[in-house]
Image (tube, helix red, strand yellow):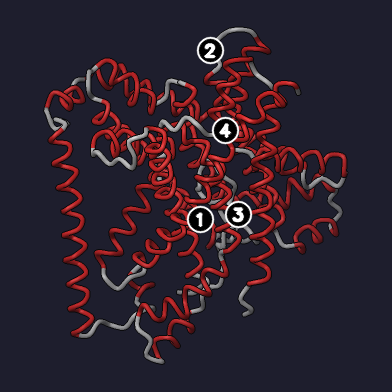
Amino acid sequence: MDELIRYAPDLAVGFLHNLQIAALCAVFSLILGTILVIMRVAPTPVLRAVGTVYVNVVRNTPLTLVLAFCALGLSDTLGLTFSDTPITNSFWLVVLGLSAYTATFVCEALRSGINTVPLGQAEAARAIGLTFFQSLRLVILPQAARSVIAPLGSVMIAMTKNTTVAIAAGYLAESAFVMRDTFDDTGVSIPIFLGLAAAFMAVTLPIGFLTGWLAKRMAVAR
Amino acid sequence: MSSQASVLFDVPGPRARLRNNILTLLTVVGILAVAYFVYVKFDEKGQWSPVLWQHFLEAKTWTDFIIPGLIGTLKAAALGSVCALIFGALFGLARLSDHWWIRIPAGVVVEFFRAIPLLLLIFFLFFLAPSVFGGGDYTLIALVTGLTLYNGSVLAEVVRAGVLAVPKGQSEAAYAIGLRKTGVLWLILIPQAITAMMPAIVSQLVVLLKDTALGYIIAYQDLLNMGFVILPANYFGTRVTSAIVIAIIYIGLNMALSALATWLEKRSRGSSKTSARPVAPPSATGVGTGTTGVAGGTPGL
């Protein structure tokens, strides 16, 4: 218990970095995921193909590899740098990589939501003369999103937990790294592990409950 | 896909065709621009130099590095899968127990391991093992145990959902013909539940295979480690090229397994062997909690 108290400030700072990454990725992955799902149902075949290939390739790549690639490929080889400070640079690379990865799951969740919207809704939307974008924006996506709140919540929970993989992109400030560091110093400590696990549960469990509650509240009555 | 999407838009008229063509052109130009940018940047760094690629033509690269790495990955995945399936079956059935002193502890274990980051668990086990069992190489053990506890917990939920997905009439009928609890479970519920669970199980195993890459972070000798650390150490400057080849192998493997899961799901949806609807796959999010998907929803768009 002493170790936990001694290292609590360090771990808390690390955990805040996790939360920062998670908050940014939640925003970016939801936006990118929505764009991807629009591409995947778009009238233009090429856009559909691009969306499908992107989703299938990124989804089937281990996150560790995606993040390592962000550091190695995007930053070192392609020269994409967000900042001259290495730690800030790798922070944004993690945000980029994790958002790009999570967006594919957001896209798949939304697409399965689109599949639950009855045919008649889309037909009616077309019948009253809505264009593709209008029918998506006004009729299809609002219903689709409401039916996948719970799965989207799970995607967000997974994303929050995935922030620990940031080490793979060389971002050495978040809590999993801090935990490893303290273990290197003082040996394994069960209280530190349980404390950090409790911190993650304090974030992920409420997301689960909240999205579960929202899903019930917002369910489309059919 | 096109038959699905066509519900969302009309058959394109002249203006829509024009718009489609413009969008197609823009997309193609965009992709070409990105490809050109990547090509130029790679060229600047000399990544196209044949020296960095030719070692993939040598048998030694494959027999000494890539295949052992692949075997490492598959070994962790195979051990993890078997243990996770056993763990999942045990805890899934335990959560359905009539006795609260079995049901509640099993529930706590499953919920705990599902809610914490897998990497945190693997780190913990990796550091715990030497201090409990003494020195040695615990990378494989830490990785497999972590994968088992996490994926096993997700599978436990799948098992529970699978058994609960069998209509109530089945177990009522079984009790009515005089079967006991064990008989109802093993003869009536589980055979039907397995068919319904199959796609969800396979897609969770894809997640497990993907998550073996976390072993890279604790320096387990898997495919990713081979590609990122060991190959570049043996062939100077090949880090990027090795990473690309490794990525292709990973994506190929996972896509093949995902395709199997999709095929199984299609098959079990039309299956007459079960009265249960297929359990929604707990999402292939990787390192994450399962999604209670919306499979089997009303057939819509």
Q: Are marks 3 and 2 in contact (CB under 8 Å)?
A: no
Give the amino acid type for the residue marked by disc 4 in the picture: Ser
Give the amino acid type for the residue marked by disc 3 in the picture: Ala
Residue on which the image places disc 1: B265
Is residue B200 visible to us here?
A: yes
Callout 1 secondary element: helix
Give the amino acid type for the residue marked by disc 1 in the picture: Glu
Q: Chain of mark 2?
A: B
Of the residues under marks 1 and 2, which one precedes in the sequence?
A: 2
Label 1 environment density (alpha carbons within 10 Å; few <14, some 14–19, many ≥20): many
Residue on which the image places disc 4: A175
**Distance from the alpha carbon under mark 4 to that under mark 2:** 24 Å
Q: Are marks 1 and 3 in contact (CB under 8 Å)?
A: no
Residue on which the image places disc 3: B196
Give the amino acid type for the residue marked by disc 2 in the picture: Asp
Q: Residue at x 28, y 82 (%)?
A: B11
Q: Residue at x 15, y 42 (%)?
A: B39
Of the residues under marks 1 and 3, which one precedes in the sequence?
A: 3
Q: Judge whether B179 appears above or below B12 on screen.
A: above
Residue on which the image places disc 2: B137
Q: Is A139 left or right of B156, judged from the image as shown?
A: left
- Spot occupied by residue A39 in the image (x, y as percentages of width and height): 34, 65
Q: Chain of mark 3?
A: B
Q: Quadrant of the N terminus of chain B?
A: bottom left
**Distance from the alpha carbon under mark 1 to that under mark 2:** 39 Å
Q: Judge whether B299 appears above or below A126 on screen.
A: above
Q: Quadrant of the C terminus of chain B?
A: bottom left
